[in-house]
Every structure is written in structure tokens, then in C-alpha cells.
Image: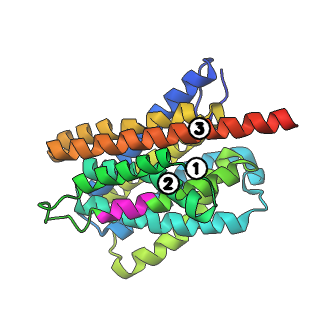
């Protein structure tokens, strides 16, 4: 048997194939979690749902901690994990509230602006050189967002800004994960996500807290378990293959969201929203490809000079 996340047995297949399968599974888990969050938020405030989902997701991870022992928690990067936990808490609360207010497919489409935010952040905060072609991709992606945000969606047009803000926060978290992945094991990254994010989410949940019933807790545990499994599969995919190979599978979230939204909630994404989503996906894919090519060039130059 091939190696994989603790408790997840993987067959002996090429690493690239396994990475694709892990990403396809991770995106399906993510889409199902979003559906559960939208459904559960109709009964309990989204902030409490976000907290319970993260807390109960930790229960799913307990077997990993038991299996690996204290070594899973051994790290010297608590400051970075703490920062990531704070940002992830705000991001999770905002995303759960967005799913309560707007259809899953529209929220998912807008979340694909994350690679564009990464490009923008790298240029502004990291001083990276960004050519006009990548700036054009960023502009096109945000133009696609405006198509989805177009006037006429007054019932939730203000709420549509939330997924854009969450995508920007996700870009920061992704940059932090990249730094952590250089020195930390995948299960350590996942465990500390829950351990540091959950207390921050509790601060959001306390003012709106109501005592949930056993049925609600069960389905929240299912959502939390799916979220933890998806995160494990995602980190494993990143370890098995370059991001340029695994990342395109993330776009499966859009058809997943469209199908789940139609079947579970009777929501149909209109034609203009599909157009906007298509523009965002194309721009994000192009931006990710250019970033991968630039990373390969830097790696080749470093190897050549070494």
C-alpha cells in the first residue's frame, strides 16, 4: 500500500495520479461541508455552526494524535500557527455567514478569486515583479466577479462581498501554509489549525449561543469530519505533486457546488453568473499556471547556480 494521511490507505499508483485523486476527494469534501454549513445555519446562528464544526472536527483527528503521540504537536512555530488560527477563524466565520446568506454556487465562484489575491498581495507586500500579462489576468478575474456582483441581485448583493473578503484571507492563509509546510508534517499543520482556530471561533459563538440538540450535533460532527478529511487529502496532494499539477483540480468545486445546490437547495445559477464564474476560473487558472512556471524557473536557476 502507498503512503497517505494517517487512517487513509492509498493504493500503489503514480504520485501524480494519487495527487489528482486526493484533490478530487478534497474538493468533494469541501463542497459537502459547504452544503452542511448552509443547511445547519438555518437552525443555529452561522457563528455557532462554524465553532461547532471546527471543534467536532478535532474529535475526528483524535485517532491521528493517539497514533502519532506527542510528536504530532512538536513544533517551534507556535507564533505562525497562532496567526494562522486567528485569520482562519475570521475566514471560517465569514464564510459560514456568507453561505447562510447566498447560494453555494455563487459563493464558490467568488472564492476562486483567491489566486488573484495572492498575485496582488505578492506584488504589494512581497515586492514580487508582476508583468502586465498577470495584471491583465487579475483584472479579468475581478471583472468576472463584477459580473456575478452585478446590480439586480438586491436580495443578497451586499453579502456577495463576503466571499471576496474570505478569498483574500484564504490567500494569506495559503502563504502561511506554504511556509509551514517547509518544516512541519501535514498532520501537525492540520492539528494546529483546529487547536488554534477553535478558541477564536468560540469568541464569535458565545454572544449568539443556543444549546443545540443531539441531531444537530451529529450532522455538525459529520461536517467537521468531512472538513478535516478534506484538509488531510489536500495537504497530502500538495506533498505528492507540484501545486501546478494538483491545484487545477480545485476548480471541481464549482460543478460540485452547482449540482449540490440544485439537488439539495433547489438553487440554479443563472447564465450571467456562469459567465462571470468562467472568467474568474480562466483568470485564476492562468495566474496559477504563470506562478508555477515562475517557481520552476527560480528552482532551475537555483539548481544551476548551486
Q: Is residue 44 above or below residue 115?
A: below
In the rendered image, residue 164 lying in the magenta stretch gets the answer yes
The CA distance from mark 3 to mark 2 is 32 Å
Q: Which residue is mark 1?
A: 61
Q: Residue furthest left?
A: 152
* Residue 71 vs residue 196, the one in the foreground: 196
In the rendered image, residue 110, in percent from the top left (x then y), is placed at: 33, 52
Q: Main secondary structure of the magenta part?
A: helix
| Mark 3 vs mark 2: in front | 3
Look at 32% across and 48% down and name the residue there. 109
Q: Which residue is mark 2?
A: 57
Count of residue discs? 3
Counting other residues with Cα less than 10 Å from the Cα at mark 2, is it few (<14), some (14-19), or many (20 or more)?
Answer: many
The CA distance from mark 1 to mark 2 is 7 Å
* Quarter where residue 294 is shown: top right
Callout 2 secondary element: helix
Range shown magenta: 161-167
In the rendered image, residue 208, in percent from the top left (x then y), is placed at: 34, 78
Say if mark 1 contacts mark 2, CB within 8 Å. yes
Look at 34% across and 72% down and name the residue there. 211
Mark sitting on residue 292? 3
Q: Residue furthest top?
A: 13
* Residue 39 vs residue 67, the one in the foreground: 39
Look at 14% across and 65% down and name the residue there. 155
Look at 65% across and 63% down and name the residue there. 81
* Quarter where residue 172 is shown: bottom right
Left of 262 or right of it: where is 170? right
* Residue 40 vs residue 302, the one in the foreground: 302
Say if mark 3 contacts mark 1, CB within 8 Å. no
Amino acid at each position: 500500500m502507498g503512503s497517505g494521511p494517517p487512517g487513509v490507505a492509498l493504493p500503489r499508483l503514480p504520485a501524480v495520479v494519487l495527487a489528482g485523486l486526493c484533490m478530487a476527494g478534497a474538493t468533494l469534501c469541501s463542497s459537502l461541508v459547504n452544503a452542511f454549513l448552509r443547511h445547519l445555519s438555518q437552525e443555529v446562528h452561522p457563528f455557532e455552526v462554524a465553532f461547532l464544526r471546527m471543534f467536532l472536527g478535532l474529535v475526528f483527528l483524535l485517532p491521528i494524535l493517539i497514533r502519532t503521540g506527542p510528536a504530532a504537536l512538536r513544533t517551534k512555530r507556535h507564533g505562525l500557527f497562532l496567526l494562522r488560527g486567528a485569520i482562519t477563524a475570521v475566514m471560517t466565520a465569514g464564510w459560514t455567514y456568507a453561505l447562510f446568506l447566498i447560494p453555494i454556487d455563487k459563493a464558490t465562484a467568488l472564492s476562486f478569486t483567491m489566486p488573484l489575491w495572492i498575485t496582488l498581495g505578492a506584488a504589494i507586500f512581497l515586492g514580487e515583479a508582476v508583468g502586465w500579462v498577470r495584471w491583465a489576468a487579475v483584472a479579468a478575474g475581478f471583472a468576472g466577479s463584477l459580473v456575478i456582483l452585478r446590480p439586480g441581485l438586491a436580495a443578497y448583493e451586499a453579502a456577495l462581498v463576503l466571499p471576496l473578503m474570505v478569498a483574500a484571507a484564504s490567500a494569506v492563509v495559503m502563504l502561511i501554509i506554504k511556509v509551514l509546510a517547509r518544516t512541519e508534517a501535514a498532520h501537525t499543520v492540520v492539528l494546529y489549525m483546529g487547536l488554534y482556530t477553535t478558541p477564536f471561533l468560540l469568541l464569535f459563538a458565545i454572544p449568539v449561543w443556543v444549546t443545540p440538540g443531539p441531531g444537530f450535533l451529529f450532522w455538525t460532527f459529520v461536517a467537521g469530519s468531512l472538513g478535516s478529511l478534506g484538509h488531510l487529502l489536500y495537504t497530502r496532494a500538495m506533498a505528492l505533486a507540484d501545486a501546478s499539477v494538483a491545484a487545477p483540480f480545485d476548480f471541481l468545486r464549482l460543478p460540485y457546488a452547482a449540482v449540490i445546490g440544485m439537488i439539495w437547495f433547489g438553487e440554479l445559477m443563472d447564465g450571467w453568473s456562469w459567465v462571470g464564474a468562467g472568467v474568474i476560473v480562466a483568470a485564476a487558472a492562468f495566474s496559477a499556471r504563470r506562478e508555477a512556471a515562475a517557481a520552476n524557473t527560480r528552482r532551475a536557476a537555483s539548481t544551476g547556480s548551486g
